[in-house]
Amino acid sequence: MKVAFNARLLYAPTLRGWNRYTVNLLAELPKLGVELYLYSDRPIHLDHLARLPTDSYQIRLSENLRYPVWEQYWLPQQCQKDAVDILHSPFNFGLPWFCPCPRVLTLHDAIDYVYSCKPSKWYQKLHPQALQMRLYSWIASSKAESIITVSNHAKGDLIKYLNIPESKISVVYEAADPNFHQPILESDRPRVRSKYNLNFPYIFYVGGWEGRKNIPFLLKAFGSAQLKGVKLVLAGGSEIQKTELQALAHQLHISESLELLGWVEEQDLPILYAEALCFIYPSDYEGFGLQLCEAMAVGCPILAANSTCLPEILDNGGKTFNLDNTDELAKLISNITVDHQYLQKSKIAAKQRSKFFDWGKTARKTIEIYEKLM
């Protein structure tokens, strides 16, 4: 089977979000007999290519073209030249109107339509860039013969907000990167703790700090728990957001108990999760919530918001809390930091649930979708 991927976003070295999904899927498909063709108008970053099996792919780079020309003309012409069986875009957009082969789109969520990018003023909807992105997304979702999304909740939103027929959508879960399932060397634990100056028990969060991630809620709940000797460690965010959170921490009188790491190195993440008392995910909108899989894979206890897809992904691998007030989360934090037996049971539950998510399974289900179209 010959499958072409719109791989143009893999020019960036970052391995987060859409790129993480794409690289992990590309690494598994060749093991199941798929011949990969990677289409881009910019060189693909070598770090991503290093994750793929040797000789499992061919790269096709176009000349320098305006994006609409590349998407609508170059892509289908290249599909025809290579005689591929499927064209797959894993990035929410990026499929041509006409194509000589079936098209598959991974549409991770409907956040742009439901939450994060809702313009507060009518004229923002008419901004050329906003209109352009909506056009690209509409073309891709309209013309794709099959759409993959990453949770049942996301599927419901695609049907409700984008009016995509249910019969066109398949749910295929993501998973944690393979390195999260590797045994952690005991000698690496103190090294990573020392690197980030974490010589104390801590509660962990990693991810974006934008509005829907609900980080102020987490700070308020942590302050209400009034823990002694335990700190709240946040990884991610920007300098502006860091200043805002520091100001809030000062108001809540928890400045001495808050550590803001910024973005941390990928290879350190498994240990940062594993060394934490628990991982807390207070987000009020997610399409999948990959951090839950990462934390579960290393046996880190999890407390997650009872919102959107998070209860679906977490299931019995952790505890959920409501977002109407901070009392419930504060109580859960207190329990997990003082009850050793409860902490150990939470680690076992997280590890057990992690076995449900696997990139090999993701690849097999994706191939089933390809085969139905063929």
Image (cartoon, grey):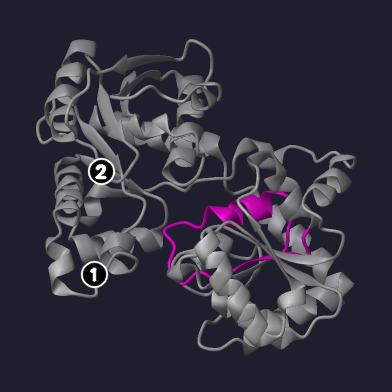
Residue at image position (86%, 78%) is 338
Residue at image position (63%, 36%) is 178
Query: What amino acid is labelled 1 in the image?
Result: Pro
Q: Which residue is mark 2?
A: 93
Residue at image position (60%, 86%) is 326
Whether residue 24 is visible to the viewer of this picture, yes or no, is: yes
- Horizontal side, residue 53 vs residue 195: left or right: left
Residue range highlighted in magenta: 276-301
Helix, strand or loop at label 2? It is loop
Q: Quadrant of the C terminus?
A: top left
Whether residue 221 is visible to the viewer of this picture, yes or no, is: no
Q: Which residue is mark 1?
A: 119
From the top left corner, tell me how far across and down residue 310 is, in percent: 51, 65
| Mark 2 burial class by Cα count in 10 Å: few <14, some 14-19, many 20+ | many
From the top left corner, tell me how far across and down residue 236 is, in percent: 58, 56
Query: What amino acid is labelled 2 in the image?
Result: Phe
Q: Tag on residue 343?
A: none
- Give the Cα distance between marks 2 and 1: 20 Å
368 lies above or below 299: above
- Horizontal side, residue 244 vs residue 109: left or right: right
338 lies above or below 69: below
- Residue 38 sits inside the magenta stretch: no
Q: Quadrant of the N terminus?
A: top left
| Mark 1 burial class by Cα count in 10 Å: few <14, some 14-19, many 20+ | some
Which one is nearer the viewer's eye here, 216 or 304? 216
